[in-house]
Each structure stands twice: as structure tokens, then as C-alpha cells.
Image (spheres, helix red, strand yellow):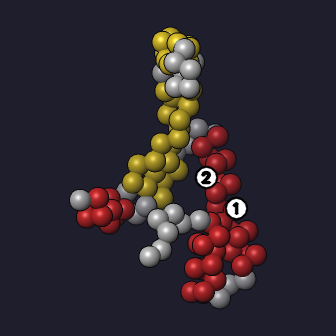
Amino acid sequence: MASAKLTKAEIIEEIFNEHGVNRKDIHAVIDAFFDEIKKALEEDRIVELRGFGTFEIRTRKGREKARNPKTGDIVPVDNHGVCVFRPGKELKTLAWPLRK
């Protein structure tokens, strides 16, 4: 049985096996792809990949009485950004039967 986790190295290997493109070129394209997504999110842009999903940064409200899970101490938490992924319709349709 295959591992439940898929790594970037495994993706590169699969693309190499399927298309025969040089591994270094595949690695460079994947890295450039992720860099573009990160850059867009840093610029507060929404990244929409049709048929897959949407990435965006949302502001999470700070709280005065958050707890440190390690010590149990009450600590204040400032407003901060969180990256959110919303799956697209096709991905939802694909994933839904797997979660039943």
C-alpha cells in the first residue's frame, strides 16, 4: 500500500516517469510555480486554480485570553494572517466519496 503522504520528490518522479522530462527541469518548474503562489499571497492576492481550488490570506482576529497549549498560561494573541485553501468544485466532487 502506498504512503498516505505525497512528497514533492514523488511528484517529480511521477512526472518524470510519465513524460520523460529532465528531473532538474521538473523541479525548477514546480519551485517556480510555488514561488509565484507565495509571491501572490504576500501581495494579498487571491490565487485561483480552476478545477483545483483557491488560496487566499485571511486575517484572524486576535484574542486576549488564548492559552499556551504547552503551559496552560493565558497569553494575548495579536491579529494575524492565515492561509486558507478552498477546494474547487471538481476537487470536492473527487474527494467527497473518499471521506464517507
In the rendered image, which residue does mark 1 sit on?
Answer: 32
The reply, left or right, for residue 76 in relation to residue 97 is right
Q: Residue at x 52, y 25 (%)?
A: 69
Q: Secondary structure at mark 1?
A: helix
Q: Residue at x 54, y 66 (%)?
A: 6
Q: How many marks?
A: 2
Q: Which mark is residue 50?
A: none
Q: Residue at x 52, y 50 (%)?
A: 47
Residue 40 screen position, x and y as percent:
62, 47
Q: Which sits in the foreground, 90 or 10?
A: 10
Q: Secondary structure at mark 2?
A: helix
Q: Is residue 11 above or below residue 52?
A: below
The reply, left or right, for residue 1 in relation to residue 93 is right
Q: Which sits in the foreground, 12 or 44?
A: 12
Residue 50 visible in the snapshot: no
Q: Residue at x 68, y 54 (%)?
A: 35
Residue 1 screen position, x and y as percent:
44, 76
Residue 80 screen position, x and y as percent:
57, 26
The reply, left or right, for residue 79 in relation to residue 85 is right
Which label's residue is closer to the chain start, 1 or 2? 1
Q: Is residue 50 above or below residue 83?
A: below
* Disc 1/disc 2 C-alpha distance (Å): 9 Å
User: For the residue marked with disc 2, what is the amino acid?
Assistant: Ile
Q: Is residue 10 above or below residue 52?
A: below
Residue 91 screen position, x and y as percent:
36, 62
Q: Which mark is residue 37?
A: 2
Crowding near pointer 1: few (<14 within 10 Å), some, many (20+)?
A: few
